[in-house]
Amino acid sequence: MSLSRRQFLAGLAASPLLLNTSVSAANPPSILVIGAGMAGLAAARALSDQGLKVTLLEGRQRIGGRIHTSRVWPDYPMDLGASWIHGQKQNPITSLANAAQAKRIATSYDNAELYIDKRLKELGVKGTNETALEKLVNKALKQAANLDEDISLQAAVERVLTKPLSPAYQAQLNFYLNSTYEQEYSGATRELSAQTLDDNEEFEGADLLFPQGYDQLTNYLAQGLDLRLGQIVSKVNYEKTGVTVSTQDQSYSADYVIITVPLGVLKRNSIQFNPPLPPAKQAAIQRLGMGLLNKAYLRFNKVFWPKELDWLEYLSPDAGRWAEWVSFAKIGAPVLLGFHAADRAREVETWTDQAVIADAMKALKAMFGNAIPQPVGVQLTRWSQDPFAYGSYSFNAVGSSNEDRQALANKNGRLYWAGEATHSEYLGTVHGAYLSGVRAAKAVLKLV
Ligand SMILES: Cc1cc2nc3c(=O)[nH]c(=O)nc-3n(C[C@H](O)[C@H](O)[C@H](O)COP(=O)(O)OP(=O)(O)OC[C@H]3O[C@@H](n4cnc5c(N)ncnc54)[C@H](O)[C@@H]3O)c2cc1C
């Protein structure tokens, strides 16, 4: 089933995200949106469709932000940022994908195979011990919830361990914490809040990825919008009467501004605000965590792993090392995607490409034997070094909570805020970014 663009917009208007305020004012306000990722595009689309004058300022020479489809391999577009619609039921990104007529394919965590490193096999390890570890971590989180002060997930787990761990059990625990928490939230266990890390919501249904690229959705939203690429915002002056935004070579004025730059950019103070941001917003920027998830796409001349699998898991004595792989064999591509999260990702980012590839191949040889071919192409990400993101997505760090996300989302003066980090329920996701953009657009429309 697919929808036309018009049907999509009609659906949007009829949904709970209702944007049915037609602009009637003789002099509709002008709006600048900073950042053309999913949040900025969703906000600009909604406002522009209501007849408001909207200009998008984007620092990069492309739109999409943390949705970035690489077409380095023209036959196989690869997503270097977001890949999946997580939970397709009721998810607004499903409607958007229908409208954009973007093909999707489901992957399932249940369709996985575990490969155990021979050093652990020699210690008698036969599996991940998931059920027992889940029980242990749940107990740790339950106890941590009753403490007066927040502690890290790592500290919470250590509190409930009664004796020193054997190397085999330690490796299983590390694997569980890495694949369940670090890869999902992109923060390290020593950073993740034990009290609030799970304070988010999920949509039900399958996880779907886009064989032709996630950018079909951002390109679809961007149609006809006034987009200014290569405009790196460095100053925002906001007063009672209006806002002036300065980039490296231009100055823009507007009645209202919607800011959607990533939390990582705000943490670096890449943008100077005048007057300074309210203390609660500054504290929220400091307290919330900006995590790291990196991808390594390895292309081979043939598929040498079981074609039918979605996920290949590697349990090794080295915490978080090449623990999770996704196979693209299902879409006919002889491509494996390996992930690194949090501290391990930060370390691997400092290596040369050659060193990363050599390490990846060592892991794959441990999983499939020495006879596997060398890759014929590789694409690696280094999101923490990206000056327009400084990380992958936000997480609840020790001492932070959804109140911080609310503080980040609150308007101050003529500034409105969106972006995944401002969404309490769906943080760290494309749908959270989208919903935050629609929320900001609705708030601005109330002024009209
Ligand atoms: C590796 C990785 C994998 C992910 N996987 C998934 C997934 O599978 N599913 C999912 O739902 N989510 C996933 N996410 C998260 C998802 O990509 C983000 O939550 C979402 O895309 C964020 O959108 P946004 O609009 O809030 O921010 P962004 O997309 O980052 O948009 C902000 C924009 O602001 C621009 N900008 C920054 N600074 C300036 C400046 N000074 N001046 C002007 N412009 C500026 C940026 O260039 C960017 O375009 C993943 C993210 C990463 C990095």
Image (tube, helix red, strand yellow):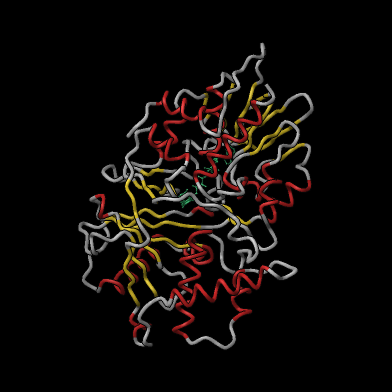
Front-most of residues 246 and 134? 134
Spot occupied by residue 445 in the image (x, y as percentages of width and height): 64, 25
Q: Nearer the viewer, residue 217 or 101?
A: 101
From the viewer's perspective, tell me whether residue 391 is left or right of residue 216: right
Residue displayed at 50% across by 43% down: 431
Quarter of the view holding residue 411 = top right
List x then y, in percent, for residue 337: 35, 57
Q: Is residue 446 above or below residue 347?
A: above
Please determine whether, in this image, residue 207 is positioned above or below residue 131.
above
Horizontal and vertical percent position of residue 124: 36, 87
Relative depth, front residue between 288 and 105: 105
Q: Residue 142: where, in percent of width, then height?
A: 62, 70
Q: How many marks?
A: 0
Quadrant of image for the N terminus: top left
Q: In which quadrant is the C terminus drawn?
A: top right
Horizontal side of 141 relative to 227 (left or right) equals right
Residue depicted at x 71% and y 28%: 243
Quarter holding residue 324:
bottom left
